[in-house]
Amino acid sequence: MAGPRVRLVVTADDFGYCPRRDEGIVEAFLAGTVTSVSLLVNGAAAESAAELARRHSIPTGLHANLSEGRPVGPARLGASSLLSREGFFLGKMGFREAVAAGDVALPQVREELEAQLSRFRELLGRDPTHVDGHQHVHVLPDTTSLFVVLRIEPGLHACQVSALLLEPYPQPRLM
């Protein structure tokens, strides 16, 4: 009797970050090295990456971003706990520290995630095959539950979850 069938999924993150990176990702997909991609809808090359995904029938998920660049949701219009004074996300460590300190308004996180899902649908005309987080923002306490809610949306098939959720979140060390 044959054992369970195993399928290895190799996902290239940061699709839409820049054209040069996207070219390499498409090349890896066409060579069979990569099986899917995760699109940064706020990336500088998001539109051209979406076109590449459609042209090459690449399974594409949402690479939700709360740490780099500018938002696509309501936060872009004014003050937000997700943004620096300059209007950019807080950065990888800045976002983590703000979450740990309780300085991030979770309704604003949810609005941004919903806006990114909506933007994905605009760019590709369909639901993402999966959802994961840029710089692992999807595994942080508090944000994880929002990713699970996003995952419940009709049509979404997978959301990456980490074993890190089984351990307490380390508090940032302040020097």
Image (spheres, grey):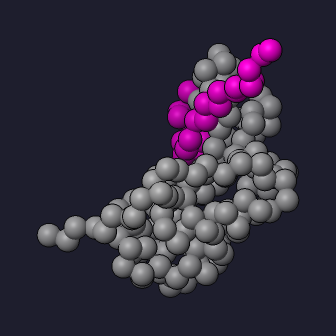
Q: Is residue 158 above or below residue 24?
A: below
Q: Residue at x 80, y 62 (%)?
A: 153
Q: Residue at x 53, y 33 (%)?
A: 20
The image position of residue 7, as x and y in percent, is 70, 27
Q: Along the line of sight, which residue is nearer the eye, 4 or 88?
A: 4
Q: Quadrant of the N terminus?
A: top right
Q: Residue furthest bottom?
A: 79
Q: Is residue 14 magenta?
A: yes
The image position of residue 108, as x and y in percent, is 59, 79
Tell me if I can see residue 50 in this picture: no
Q: Residue furthest left?
A: 175
Residue 54 as seen in the image, left or right of residue 140: right
Q: Quadrant of the C terminus?
A: bottom left
Tell me if I can see residue 147 in this picture: yes
The image position of residue 37, as x and y in percent, is 65, 38
Residue 12 as seen in the image, left or right of residue 96: right
Q: Is residue 10 magenta?
A: yes
Q: Residue at x 47, y 79 (%)?
A: 104
Q: Is residue 58 above or below residue 81?
A: above
Q: Find the magenta span and give its range.
A: 1-24
Which quadrant of the structure image shows residue 19? Answer: top right
Which quadrant of the structure image shows residue 74? Answer: bottom right
What number of labels is visible?
A: 0
Q: Along the line of sight, which residue is nearer the eye, 6 or 156?
A: 6
Q: Residue at x 80, y 31 (%)?
A: 57
Which quadrant of the structure image shows residue 149? Answer: bottom right
Q: Is residue 172 above or below residue 31?
A: below
The image position of residue 10, as x and y in percent, is 61, 30
